[in-house]
Image: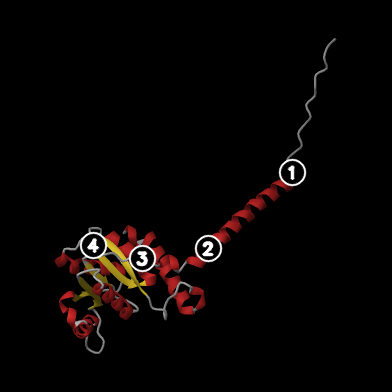
Amino acid sequence: MSSVPSQSVPSAPPNPISRIHRRAGRRNIFLLLLLVAFLFFARFAASMLVRDHPEKSDVIVVLAGDSQDERYRRGMELLRAGYARHLLLDASSDSRYFGHTPAEYAEAFLKQDAKEMSSQVSVCAFELDSTLTETGYVGKCLGPFHPAAVLLVTSDWHTMRARSIFVHHLPQYHWSVAAAKDPRLFDTRWWRRREWAKITFNEWLKVIWWNAVDRWR
């Protein structure tokens, strides 16, 4: 008795509507994850800029820029606490206000404000106002001290980028950084004031530019 060959049942054709739904679902999940990542970044965008880990060093370098008084006060606080033997105060020498350069004003200021520590403080004059160009002048000012470790002092929002730039351009030194706070200009709760938001946004643009462009030049 011969067997009857079995007939295969044809599979149902793929449902295009189901395929569209699956693609839409994957896209929605991706967009949701992207939104969560963006909200997480936005919440911590300002605090991610801040580094405040001072270490015992040979020289303290107070960078020039906004909130110069707060940076100087923080540097002197660390000098008096024994974090270094000498402090360099950066100040511009290529511009003049009422007949004097910021470097000249800084020299006169140190003679009055830190006269009891005059042998431990000095001005490091620089030209061209950018953290990148500042590294070259700081390197020359550090030369006579022959330091192994240097402590940077700068505004809190500037600490991450400043340390990265100095480590890259002057790798012969061990770098740490201390944050000087000025709540008039910046706070990690950046969404509460327009100035805080502006500083945070502008600094992230500079961080991106440094890592994407300037670092590789």
Q: Please, which residue is most extreme toward the top here?
A: 1
User: Dot 3 corresponds to which residue?
Assistant: 161
* Foreground label between 3 and 2: 2
Amino acid on which disc 3 is placed: Arg
Left or right: 35, with 166 as reference point:
right
Q: Position of residue 4 (x, y in %)?
A: 83, 17
Crowding near pointer 1: few (<14 within 10 Å), some, many (20+)? few
Q: Are marks 3 and 2 in contact (CB under 8 Å)?
A: no
Which numbered disc flags the more N-terminal residue, 3 or 2? 2
Separation of marks 2 and 4 at Cα, in angstroms:
35 Å
Amino acid on which disc 2 is placed: Phe
* Foreground label between 2 and 4: 4
User: Dot 2 corresponds to which residue?
Assistant: 40
* Foreground label between 3 and 1: 3
**From where the camera sits, is residue 34 visible?**
yes
User: Dot 1 corresponds to which residue?
Assistant: 15
- Residue occupying image coordinates x 47% and y 67%: 45
| Residue at disc 1, secondary structure | loop
Q: Nearer the viewer, residue 195 or 22?
A: 195
Separation of marks 4 and 1 at Cα, in angstroms:
67 Å
Crowding near pointer 3: few (<14 within 10 Å), some, many (20+)? many
